[in-house]
Image (cartoon, rainbow, N blue to C red):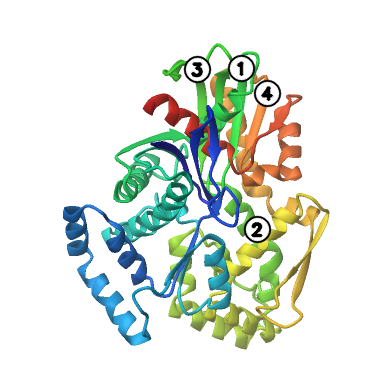
């Protein structure tokens, strides 16, 4: 059986064909998407989970040999912490967030692992660890769908951004696709194909077109924004070779996560001392505050969690006219609440799609601490990444050499009225249509899987 698999930066979704239509399968709490987050009581349990899941004997032996030291540590943690063989030690999606909120500094939490797959400078052990994270998350989704459908899944089309990273894109893409391919094979997919995510979103849209049009498809995902200019409609949709129909595509590593990070940095970090006055009259250094909220950057997180940053915060506290703010920042760092803070920023962004103001509670940091945010504050905070998104859209149109008949936007952040307003103002008087913000890519991938595997 074949499926379309949107292994997304923010959410995962999977579709299968039923009754001649792509159907997204509920993955958690009746919802057809699973947040791309994982929490483990020990990071070694992630590798242990992969070792237990590999079905092929030879492949499992080879894998165990390559992870021998890690698996030995996992067994030691089990003995020391008295974890039994059937205890749940790894959590996914909303459960992962819940466990992280309850025990932020006791386990290992990762959100949006897809953001890291194309990172430059990753050592072999890093790449292997990301393979393990992706494998477990893919396995969670695949098993949920197989349990619902009762049919083993052996073929898949997985969505991919145009570029996983902006720097050395070719090497980045190769590395990320290899990680995804290894993980997909380990969970039992025999045939794995990849399709650009904006093209997949366009294929979902194309099913409903009753006339030929040139469409600018804009997919604003959690980690990337991808655009494609595509000829679509009844004359095109049954073709297997669509190469000539794709007029242009652009993509960059700027997405919904960057909007969350900008909002967290500019509106939440002042509560922790960013911009606060120093006794010396010198400006407060800002990089350590930005490192805290740049949760999609391995290097930034390593620096933030380093002993050097701890000492820097202690020194700044002595120099600060408002030391209580630096105490608050030290508490956030010590208890690993920075991911929670960026999640609050994401929640604020979502809330401000439907209202002009939202109140965010930060009581997990300090009793009665909260922040009221307005849509205008969001608009101001996200200007830099939003400008990059607009440039990608303009570049796709320029590269294609023609004006689109319609703009089709999808992806979680595309729901924001701020983004839609910018598109209308910057691109021109062109109809802007909304897609299924969370499901259109998975549906389009399922459509393509049906065409190439059936």
Quadrant (top left/top right/bottom left/bottom right) for the N terminus: top left
Q: Which residue is mark 3?
A: 245
Q: Which residue is mark 1?
A: 402
Q: Residue at x 36, y 57 (%)?
A: 130
Mark 3–mark 2 distance (CA, rounded to whole Å): 36 Å
Expressed as whole percent of the image width and height from the top left, the position of residue 428 reads 74, 26
Q: Residue at x 58, y 35 (%)?
A: 392
Expressed as whole percent of the image width and height from the top left, the position of residue 167 reads 42, 45
The mark closer to the camera, 1 or 2, is: 2
Q: Pick whichever of labels 1 and 3 is earlier in the sequence.
A: 3
Query: In the picture, residue 333 is in which quadrant?
Result: bottom right
Q: Pick whichever of labels 3 and 4 is earlier in the sequence.
A: 3
Q: Pick whichever of labels 3 and 2 is earlier in the sequence.
A: 3
Q: Residue at x 37, y 80 (%)?
A: 83
Q: Which residue is mark 2?
A: 346
Q: Which residue is mark 4?
A: 406
Mark 2–mark 4 distance (CA, rounded to whole Å): 29 Å
> Are circles 3 and 2 on residues that touch, CB within 8 Å?
no
The mark closer to the camera, 1 or 4, is: 4
Mark 3–mark 4 distance (CA, rounded to whole Å): 15 Å
Can the viewer see residue 59? yes
On screen, residue 226 versus residue 298, left or right, reads right
Neighbourhood count class around disc 3 (C-alpha, 10 Å): few under 14, some 14–19, many 20 upward = some
Expressed as whole percent of the image width and height from the top left, the position of residue 295 reads 52, 62
């Amino acid at each position: 059986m074949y499926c379309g698999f949107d292994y997304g930066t923010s959410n995962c979704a999977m579709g299968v064909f039923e009754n001649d239509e792509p159907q997204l399968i509920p993955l958690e709490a009746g919802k057809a998407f699973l947040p791309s987050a994982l929490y483990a009581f020990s990071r070694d349990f992630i590798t242990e989970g992969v070792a237990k899941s590999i079905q092929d004997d030879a492949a499992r032996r080879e894998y165990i040999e390559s992870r021998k030291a890690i698996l030995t540590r996992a067994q030691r943690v089990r003995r020391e912490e008295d974890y039994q063989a059937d205890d749940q030690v790894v959590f996914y999606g909303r459960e992962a967030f819940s466990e992280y909120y309850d025990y932020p500094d006791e386990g290992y939490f990762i959100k949006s692992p897809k953001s890291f797959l194309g990172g430059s400078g990753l050592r072999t052990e890093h790449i292997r660890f990301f393979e393990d994270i992706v494998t477990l998350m893919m396995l969670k989704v695949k098993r949920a769908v197989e349990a619902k459908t009762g049919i083993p899944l052996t073929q898949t089309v997985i969505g991919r951004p145009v570029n996983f990273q902006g720097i050395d894109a070719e090497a980045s893409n190769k590395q990320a696709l290899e990680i995804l391919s290894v993980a997909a094979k380990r969970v039992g997919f025999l045939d794995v194909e990849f399709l650009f995510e904006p093209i997949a979103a366009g294929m979902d849209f194309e099913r409903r077109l009753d006339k030929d049009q040139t469409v600018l498809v804009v997919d604003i995902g959690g980690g990337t924004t991808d655009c494609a200019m595509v000829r679509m409609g009844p004359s095109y949709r049954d073709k297997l070779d669509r190469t000539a129909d794709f007029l242009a595509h652009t993509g960059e590593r700027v997405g919904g996560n960057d909007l969350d990070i900008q909002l967290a940095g500019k509106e939440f970090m002042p509560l922790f001392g960013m911009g606060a006055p120093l006794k010396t009259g010198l400006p407060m250094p800002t990089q350590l505050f930005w490192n805290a909220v740049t949760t999609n950057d391995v290097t930034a997180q390593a620096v933030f969690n380093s002993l050097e940053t701890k000492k820097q915060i202690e020194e700044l506290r002595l120099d600060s006219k408002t030391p209580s703010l630096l105490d608050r920042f030290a508490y956030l760092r010590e208890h690993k609440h920075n991911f929670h803070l960026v999640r609050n920023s994401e929640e604020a962004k979502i809330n401000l799609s439907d209202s002009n103001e939202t109140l965010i509670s930060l009581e997990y940091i300090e009793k009665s601490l909260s922040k009221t945010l307005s849509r205008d504050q969001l608009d101001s905070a996200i200007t830099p990444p939003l400008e990059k998104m607009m440039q990608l859209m303009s570049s796709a149109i320029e590269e294609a050499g023609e004006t689109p008949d319609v703009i089709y936007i999808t992806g979680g952040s595309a729901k924001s009225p701020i983004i839609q307003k910018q598109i209308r103002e910057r691109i021109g008087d062109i109809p802007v249509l909304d897609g299924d913000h969370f499901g259109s890519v998975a549906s389009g991938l399922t459509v393509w899987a049906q065409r190439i595997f059936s």
